[in-house]
Image (spheres, rainbow, N blue to C red):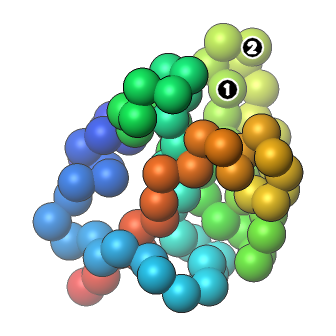
Amino acid sequence: PRTSPEQFNYSKAESVSGPLKKGDLVFFDGFRGKNVVSHVGIMLSDSEFVNANGNVGEVKVDNINDSYWQEKYMGARRLIT
């Protein structure tokens, strides 16, 4: 799937309840508390993930434990085969 909501609901992904792993998709609410998936990143390690900000045209590595991301975090998915 192309969009973050479609990726979040993809049938070949399972919810991640334990520690995050490299390659897990992490999802965020980018609509200021409306509880709507609108942003996705890919975990690089147990705390760092890569994400693209289309508003500023940057790809960045961020820490998922930062308060900014924690307040927007909606869950993670792991693709299954």
Q: CA distance from mark 1 to mark 2?
A: 6 Å
Q: Which mark is residue 68?
A: none
Classify 10 Å Cα crowding around label 2: few (below 14), some (14-19), many (20 and above).
Answer: few
Give the SS element for disc 2. loop
Q: Is residue 18 left or right of residue 38?
A: right
Q: Quadrant of residue 15?
A: bottom left
Q: Residue at x 75, y 14 (%)?
A: 56
Q: Which mark is residue 56?
A: 2
Figure quadrant of the C terminus? bottom left
Label tally? 2
Q: Residue at x 60, y 41 (%)?
A: 72
Q: Quadrant of residue 53?
A: top right
Q: Residue at x 80, y 60 (%)?
A: 65
**Label 1 amino acid?**
Asn
Give the x, y percent position of residue 42.
60, 58
Give the x, y percent position of residue 23.
57, 72
**Label 2 amino acid?**
Val
Image: 52 above or below 80:
above
Give the SS element for disc 1. strand
Image: 34 above or below 12:
above
**In the rendered image, which residue does mark 1 sit on?**
53
> CB atoms at circles 1 and 2 under 8 Å apart?
yes
Q: Closest to the observer: 50 or 67?
A: 67
Give the x, y percent position of residue 35.
40, 35
Identity of the residue furthest to the top in this view: 55
Q: Is residue 61 left or right of residue 36?
A: right
Image: 60 above or below 31:
below
